Image: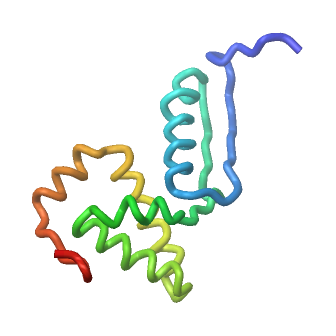
Amino acid sequence: MGEVDLAATLLQLSLVGITNMTDRVAILDKIEHDLRSRLRHLDLSADDLVTRPSDDDLASLAGEGMLGAAAAKLYAKVRAGEGGAALANRALERLFEVLLREPEAAAHHRQQLPQVPRAGHD
């Protein structure tokens, strides 16, 4: 098989599986910022790439003030498996993506929002 001319390549890529939030963001960033720019066309579907937050993912969100409080509420809804759990998981994924991809924007929001005291902390 000869070498592939990526600039002339059309690719349909479907991501399927289970990963944590940090890895999902890294995978999608790599595809968006490396692979997409090298291809003629990329049709990407990540709808079946299910995200399960790891303990590290949740710990990184805990220090985010109001954003961390929102993440904790979303995660509680996901864990409870109640109505809207899928939507809560998507919202949690999006929040995590914003915090990882746009740390300056997240820092700006932390400055604009009042801090929520956490139980057991001064």
**In the image, farthest residue toward the right:** 1
Residue 95 in sight in this render: no
Seen in the image, is 18 located left or right of residue 99?
right
Seen in the image, is 20 located left or right of residue 95?
right
Residue 117 in sight in this render: yes
In the rendered view of the protein, which quadrant contains the N terminus? top right
Q: Position of residue 98 (x, y in %)?
A: 35, 52
Question: Is residue 19 placed above or below 116 in the rendered structure?
Answer: above
Q: Position of residue 112 (x, y in %)?
A: 10, 59
Q: How many marks?
A: 0
In the rendered view of the protein, which quadrant contains the C terminus? bottom left
- Find residue 73 and report its image quarter: bottom left
Q: Residue at x 33, y 66 (%)?
A: 62
Question: Is residue 82 placed above or below 68 in the rendered structure?
Answer: below
Front-most of 62 and 85? 62
Question: Is residue 43 placed above or below 3 in the rendered structure?
Answer: below
Q: Position of residue 46 (x, y in %)?
A: 60, 52
Q: Position of residue 105 (x, y in %)?
A: 23, 48
Colour setting: rainbow
Q: Residue at x 25, y 52 (%)?
A: 106
Q: Residue at x 31, y 44 (%)?
A: 102
Seen in the image, is 113 located left or right of residue 120?
left
Front-most of 21 and 48? 21
Question: Is residue 84 placed above or below 103 in the rendered structure?
Answer: below
